[in-house]
Image: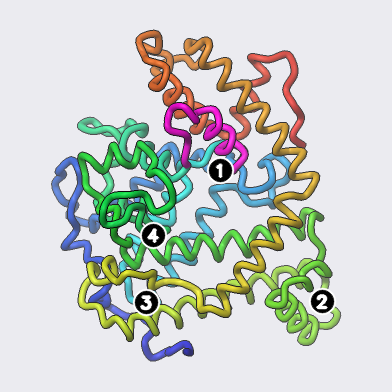
Amino acid sequence: MGLDRNLLGFGAGHRAPWASDPARSRGRLHAEAPSSTRSPFQRDRDRIIHSTAFRRLKHKTQVFVAHEGDHYRTRLTHTIEVAQIARALARALRLDEDLAEAVALVHDFGHTPFGHTGEDVLDTLLADHGGFDHNAQSLRIVTQLERRYATFDGLNLTWESLEGLVKHNGPLVDASGHGLNGPVPRPILDYNAIHDLHLSSFASLEAQVAAIADDIAYNTHDIDDGLRGGLLTLDMLEDVPFLEALLNAVHASYPDLEESRVIHEIMRRQITAMVEDVIATAQDRLNELKPNCADDIRHAGRVVARFSEDMKRADGAIKAFLYSNMYRHPEVMRVRERAAAIVRDLYGAYLQKPDLMGGEWAAGAENLDDGSLARRVADYLAGMTDNFAIGQHRVLFDHTPELG
């Protein structure tokens, strides 16, 4: 296997047969007149960027809490980085770049404040009401909770963008409808009942490159943030052979380079190696499958945009390294415990007194059953930024944990 540069789509003026064709989109749940200046997938991307949920990503945590420093990544900067890598992969594989970018830009909409900490807390608190899943929450946001348009709730994205959002990590059910990774979250099943997203098939190749771009981005940039934040050191990278090789190559070429530049050199080389590996692996699979349309990708029975076996092992080693040395770092765990307390406190307060949420969130809450009220509180909490959640806690409670 090797990267075939003759097959790259750089500068190509046409899509490959296996690309999603915006002219053949399966449309939107609510019919709309087509745009005279933009394709359906371009409109999706633009609606995502102009949404309230997208702006809120600016103040939602990636790993560090946002106020610890301006140089650490938030959900917004991470999302932009994912979109850039997804677009690069899509161009190389002659896909629809706008659809790949749209799926990348929307993939983290459902994340709570305080990163995965908030999600874990809400999932536990809603255990009797279907739990909480950030991917399902993303779907709720773009189909219900964004209320901007005169004739429909949500963003009314195309079928292809919604399919990519829900299935970018693979099918959710088998041919008989049983969940492949446990029960399918209720919000996804509810939406699928009115707008079938074909949960048993793979997603488009555009969605697949968005998913692998997410892996590449957070693996690389969490290392970057960890090094710059002092949770990791360059010497520690020697525990992962793939990273050790990159570090040695940088030192060999630039023996006296200052540490900040060494870090950047490692990160850019890691991204390049992973991106080129995905392109080469996808090219090999496309040569085997010889797909004639986007549906051939959906029914290929396996992921097309993935790492080679060697890179998959390297990716697993990086994830294990980050889990042990960064995500479970005592400082990060201390912040997580305090953030979890904020989310638990707010949930309990709003559940007991829904009027504290104010506005449309409080309207009619007294008529909701327990499950519906719990879901509304979760929707309200999940939409909060880190800063807003901290501020609300300070209003409602005498003591708010310090996260910095």
Q: Quadrant of the C terminus?
A: top right
- Taking depth in this image into account, of 110 and 299 the one nearest to the observer is 299
**Alpha-carbon span between mark 2 and mark 4:** 42 Å
Looking at the rendered structure, the secondary structure element under dot 1 is helix
Amino acid type at mark 3: Leu
- Image side of residue 242 versus residue 184, left or right: right
**Alpha-carbon span between mark 4 and mark 3:** 19 Å
Residue at the spot of label 4: 170
- Image side of residue 36 versus residue 136, left or right: left
Q: Are marks 3 and 2 in contact (CB under 8 Å)?
A: no
Mark 1 is surrounded, within 10 Å at the Cα level, by few (under 14), some (14 to 19) or many (20 or more) other residues, namely some
Res. 93 mark:
3
Q: Quadrant of residue 274?
A: bottom right
Residue 253: image x %, image y %? 76, 86
Mark 4 is surrounded, within 10 Å at the Cα level, by few (under 14), some (14 to 19) or many (20 or more) other residues, namely many
Res. 257 mark:
2
Looking at the rendered structure, the secondary structure element under dot 3 is loop
Amino acid type at mark 4: Gly
Looking at the rendered structure, the secondary structure element under dot 4 is loop
